[in-house]
Image (cartoon, rainbow, N blue to C red):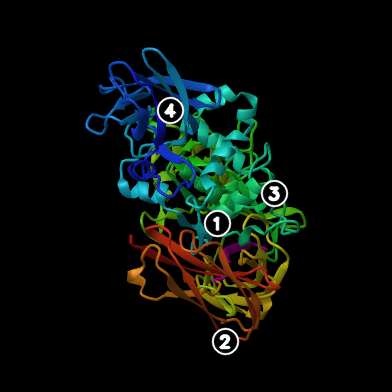
Amino acid sequence: MEDFSLKYVNLELWANQESHETQGLSSKHLVVRRGQPFKLTLFFKGRPFSPYTDSLIFRAVLGDLYVEFPATFSKPQRSSRWSARVQPGESSSQSVTVHVSTPAHSPVGCYDLHLHIVSQSWQRRYRIGEFILLCNPWCPADSVYIHNESQREEYVKNDFGFLYMGTPKNMAARPWEFGQYEDGILEICLNLLQVSPQHSKNRRTDYLSRSDPVYLSRVACAMINCEDDRGILKGNWSQDFRNGIPPSQWTGSADILKLWARSNYSPVKYGQCWVFAAVMCTVMRVLGIPCRVITNFNSAHDTNSNLVIEEFYDEKGKKLHMSRDSIWNFHVWVECWMSRPDIGSAFDGWQVLDPTPQERSRGVFCCGPSPVRGIRDRRLDVIYDIPFVYAEVNADVCTVIVKDGQAVSRTLDTERVGSLICTKGLGSNMPQDVTNTYKQPKAVVSPYGTMNGTPRSRRSVAGLEMKQSLAVSLRLNNVPVAGENISFSVTVTNKDNIPKTLREHVNAQAKEYNSSPLETFWEAHNILRIAPYEVKVIQHQIPHSAYERILTGDNLVNLAVVMEDEATQERVLASEEFNITEPEISIQIDNEDDIVVNKEHSALVVFRNPLPMPVSGILTVMGSGLLDGKVQSKLYLLQPGETMEKTVTFTPKMAGTKMLQANLVLRNSPAIIRGFRTVTVMAA
């Protein structure tokens, strides 16, 4: 009988990647998801393939692991095993169509696929090629399955988002390109697993463990920072960013990941919490694990685990650096969606993962996955790292006024920490409040020892509070805007039946989001008299000239007032931390309802300088899937009130909702002015 051999193999890239929701992830590899068949067409030369005399045996190889399975004409009996089925009706005398099925618990990675053809008198082996296998949130049997299609679109496929910063009363939304469809990003994310310490220590165990998203997420979490390994980012909170790029200048994950790969996996300088979290979100979405970025406003770092953060002020309202504990104005981490068979189905769902290096978890700088349900219910006995995250969202704040080294006033605030926890809304550009998924509502008693959302053991701290005959509050009259004066009011109430003479001390300090304030840049001191039970409102204004050259890139101010009773020396403090809103760049797009793949379109980038000073700098326009690379131009001296316009052309590569963003990095200022526009791209 005439001999026959394999001529070539069609990996059916387009059809497979469409059915597996992996379009655009790689230009080099077939990319498929586990738990779902993918199609191959084998073409032969010589005599026709005979199912009676010829056998097809596949081998899938991952590192030094492999699995062999024959192609059959019947449906596989067990979905938990690798299998291949010759598809009836899709084969001819010179070709055979085979559907390869992978178990929903298969390890993630880049596989080599081999074919062994066995005939009556001979056998041959062929290397067919490579395919990348990812987690499958579309497959109910996969432990990352998420049932809602709009959630899969947002938390797996969406390649842009927003990182929320600032303060709860004045959130600043920073656009970010996750960039998972940028060329080479998928391969870089898989290489992250290859250069991890777990892989170097035991390749076989690492490959086998990659079936578990809990394992994958912990490896990725540790590899985002470089403290224990050849991780992606080096953290820097010093404000000295020489030999690197300031964290505030990053606009997307792809640039960071590509720079890491080009440098032979040397750490990229520099990152802070939102950069760590955003890059991790990219890695997890690439691997097929649903992921979203979370901001916790007023996030506690409780170093001594007593769930109380102490803050100190002097008698003139200046905040002091006297405690190892701290409250960050905001802290950014991620949540990943997965089932938790290791701790019980009650903890399935969103899990906190925090790649910012703060504390070690089992000896490594990573945090999580901590089930959000476990944090809410204060299940401190459940892995991983629930006590640390619980304190971040639930610690109390004890504020102490000190004079000559002695405490003269103490107050306790049980509401400030974790006052708002949010993420990008589903299919929206607006934030979604998820605070109630982390924190029990008030007046709820938990079986695990909490009352009113805080541990019973902490109620004794309230005994430290001192009885006060004055009530003081501080309120901003409007949202502070760069270039404008800051207007605020102080309200003082005399709760006694005797008049009082008071000394008012008001203090403003610039601050960074993660540390104590800097030196005072504005203060005011007054004497006032208040009648029994009187309520007085004192108006104040900070001129823009006092702060415009003092603020850091976070645009944050710590404002405090101390009201002192001259007769009794009683002192009462009120404080507010707020951010100053920067101006924005406007992006206008022609024929916005007619954006089509592979068709050139134009956008007009507009910035009017509202600041009382001229500005100059570098304007950068970018858009993953819209622009190849970035468009940069110099902005020369733009006077107050003047307008700059820049026309940019772009050609979309793929359909879907995309984001065009513009950044203006100012010269001689830490401020970065931003703008964005989302567009819907239609298929051609």
CA–CA distance between discs 4 and 2? 59 Å
Please state if 141 lies on the left or on the right of 547 as rendered.
left
Circle 2: element type = loop
Question: For the residues marked 1 and 3, what is the alpha-carbon distance in whole angstroms?
Answer: 35 Å
- First in residue order: circle 1 vs circle 3: 1
Can residue 459 be seen here? The reply is no
For residue 106, which numbered disc appears in the image? Answer: 4
What amino acid is found at the position of numbered circle 2 in the picture?
Glu
Secondary structure of residue under mark 1: loop
Q: Report the disc number at residue 252.
A: 1
Which is more foreground, mark 1 or mark 3? 1
Image-quadrant location for residue 348: top left
Q: Position of residue 446 (x, y in %)?
A: 41, 36
Q: Position of residue 661 (x, y in %)?
A: 50, 66
Q: Which mark is residue 323?
A: 3
- At label 4, the amino acid type is Ser
- Tell me the SS state at disc 4: loop
261 or 417, nearer to the observer:
261
Q: Residue furthest top?
A: 121
**Total marks in image:** 4
Q: Earlier in the sequence, mark 1 or mark 2?
A: 1
Quadrant containing the N terminus is top left
- Image position of 176 (left or right of 156): right
What kind of residue is marked 3? Ser
Crowding at dot 4, Cα within 10 Å, few <14 / some 14-19 / many 20+, comes out as: many
Q: Amino acid at mark 1?
A: Gly
Q: Which residues are magenta?
A: 569-581
Q: Position of residue 226 (x, y in %)?
A: 67, 42
Distance between the alpha carbons at the discs numbered 3 and 2: 46 Å
Which of the numbered marks, if any, corresponds to residue 642? Answer: 2
